Image (tube, rainbow, N blue to C red):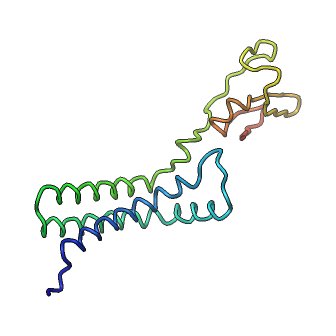
């Protein structure tokens, strides 16, 4: 028996490398869901993985590609090559995503607030909740229903720059 790994073991290693690479990037996305219950341990795990994923995911993608190339050399038939390419593509996509901040995609700040006098507003009911900010006599109110999507609003109240969040 030679020292080279068999085709079956190479296939398992390719799949495992791709799976771990994707998991390192995907687990924080699944753990940190808006409006979902989260424990301190879940948040700590998600941020820990988020911290190491820009280092680990590219290495995992490279390992997946190298192992996939060895696997295709040992088993050059089309189904094996297709599986290796798909595994490498998944790992490569995860490596790219590890450098993205998906939280910014979900919670993009509202770039500019439009104003209307309170008596002219028709899109806010009297029973609706608002986030109110008053600075030296200047006051604004942001409807929570609209803030729930963006979660962050950059604005200026009077002469003061403010960030309102919900």
Please say if 49 is above or below 110: below
Q: Quadrant of the N terminus?
A: bottom left
Q: Residue furthest top?
A: 120
Please say if 7 is above or below 143: below
- The spot of residue 146 in percent (x, y) is 67, 29
Please say if 126 is above or below 40: above
Q: Residue furthest right?
A: 137
**Which residue appears at 74% of the width and 17% of the height?**
116
**Which residue appears at 67% of the width and 51% of the height?**
37
Q: Quadrant of the C terminus?
A: top right
Is residue 87 found left or right of 22 in the rendered image? left
* Res. 94 image quadrant: bottom left
**Which residue appears at 57% of the width and 60% of the height?**
46
Is residue 37 found left or right of 85 in the rendered image? right
- The spot of residue 20 in percent (x, y) is 40, 65
* Res. 57 image quadrant: bottom left
- The spot of residue 56 in percent (x, y) is 42, 67
Give 56 or 127, whichever is nearer the viewer: 127
């Amino acid at each position: 028996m030679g020292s080279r790994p068999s085709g079956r073991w190479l296939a398992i290693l390719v799949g495992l490398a791709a799976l771990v690479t994707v998991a390192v990037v995907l687990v924080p996305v699944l753990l940190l869901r808006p409006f979902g219950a989260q424990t301190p341990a879940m948040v700590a795990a998600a941020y820990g993985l988020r911290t190491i994923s820009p280092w680990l995911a590219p290495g995992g993608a490279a390992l997946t590609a190298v192992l996939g190339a060895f696997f295709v050399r040992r088993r050059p038939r089309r189904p094996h090559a297709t599986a290796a390419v798909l595994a490498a593509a998944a790992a490569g996509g995860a490596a790219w995503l590890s450098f993205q901040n998906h939280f910014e995609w979900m919670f993009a700040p509202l770039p500019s607030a439009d104003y209307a006098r309170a008596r002219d507003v028709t899109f806010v009911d009297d029973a609706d909740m608002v986030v109110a900010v008053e600075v030296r006599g200047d006051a604004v109110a942001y409807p929570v229903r609209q803030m729930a999507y963006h979660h962050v609003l950059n604005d200026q109240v009077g002469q003061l720059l403010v960030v309102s969040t919900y």
